Image (cartoon, rainbow, N blue to C red):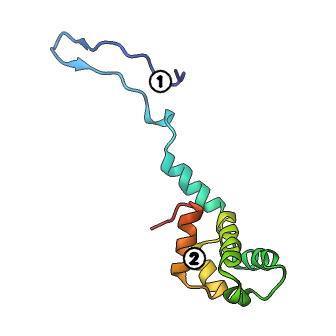
Amino acid sequence: MRSNIMPRHSREQSGTGIYHVISTPMEQFEDPIDKEDEEKESRHVSDSEARELIKHLCSHFNICEIQVFQRKERNEILGSALRYGVGVRQLARLTGVSYGIIQRINEKVGRRTVP
């Protein structure tokens, strides 16, 4: 049992007939939405960083040449970039590969998308 949760007690009725409930302050609980937002902010990759990453993954070929790679090789490179934190639209813009293709790869990689 987690230590930050107060033990349950039965409700006690006051002299006025009103039940009083003691609750745990909300500050004690971590908000998972805030954690996700912090993670997204910390994983932002600039265009220059993304270009260098893609060049490294492409064995120093020109970034635009990724469009003519074999499908399996192209998908592995794009999937690696997505796992690193490059955004779907950003990757589409930098490589010239369509947004739809990169989105499908993103779904296979299992990275959470932002609506």
Q: Which residue is mark 1?
A: 5
Which residue ends up furthest to the top in the rendered image? 15
Amino acid of disc 2: Ile
- Secondary element type, mark 2: helix
Give 94 or 67, whichever is nearer the viewer.
67
Separation (CA) of disc 1 from disc 2? 43 Å
Residue 28: assigned label: none
Amino acid of disc 1: Ile
**In the picture, residue 56 is in which quadrant?**
bottom right
Asked if marks 1 and 2 touch (Cβ < 8 Å), the reply is no
Q: From this view, report whether residue 84 is shown above or below residue 12.
A: below
Closest to the camera, between mark 1 and mark 2, is 2
On the image, the x and y values in percent for residue 26 come to: 44, 35
Q: Is residue 16 left or right of residue 79?
A: left
Q: Is residue 73 left or right of residue 2?
A: right
Q: Residue at x 71, y 73 (%)?
A: 77
Q: From this view, report whether residue 78 is shown above or below residue 17.
A: below
Q: Which residue is mark 2?
A: 102
**How would you rate the neighbour count of disc 1 (Cα within 10 Å): few for under 14, some for 14-19, many for 20 or more?**
few
Specify the quadrant that holds the C terminus.
bottom left
Which residue ends up furthest to the right in the rendered image? 60
